[in-house]
Image (cartoon, grey):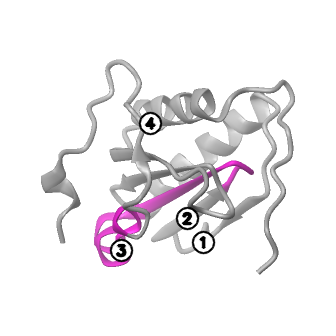
Amino acid sequence: MKKKTFLPTTPLIPTEEKSQLLAALLDEKQGENIVVLDVTGICPIAEHIIVVSARGQRHAQSLADAAMHLAKEKNLISFGMEGYDAGAWILVDLNDIIIHVFQDDIRHYYNIEGLWAEGTRVAAPTGLMPASDDDQED
């Protein structure tokens, strides 16, 4: 597997700050159980992973659209998204940050948080309630 080269964003915004902006946006758009994981040095394709639940296909698509709009507004590098049409699991690739927008049943099945359990949870932005451990169980 070819290792991804992280391209600088314009203007340069640190990964953690971008994650905080994105998590706050997803919360504002009523995304649920938002988890931000720092997977620097563990994941070869990203430094942070954001996992968020949506209430349905249209909600998932609107969360992905909002993330892409913010990326465009802030001049962040974006490599696009996958799974948008089905809306059950949408992956948004923002170079050093990967956002997984899931509908709940799919989120629990794939258990991204468990897959990247070696990563460190990043504190949620002020006012954003972190998901409890009970929310992460199968």
Tell me where the magenta segment starts and ends, as one range.
Answer: 93-114
Seen in the image, is 28 located left or right of residue 129? right
| Residue 97 horizontal/vertical position (percent) | 63, 48
Q: Which residue is mark 4?
A: 29
Q: Are marks 4 and 2 in contact (CB under 8 Å)?
A: no
Q: Callout 4: helix, strand or loop?
A: loop
* Earlier sequence position, callout 1 versus callout 4: 4
Q: Which residue is mark 1?
A: 83
Q: Nearer the viewer, residue 48 or 85?
A: 48
Q: Amino acid at mark 4?
A: Lys
4 vs 3, front mark: 3
> Is 99 placed above or below 8 here?
below
Q: Amino acid at mark 3?
A: Ile
Q: Which residue is mark 3?
A: 106
Q: Amino acid at mark 1?
A: Gly
Q: Which residue is mark 2?
A: 90
Q: Callout 1: helix, strand or loop?
A: loop
* In magenta segment, residue 35: no
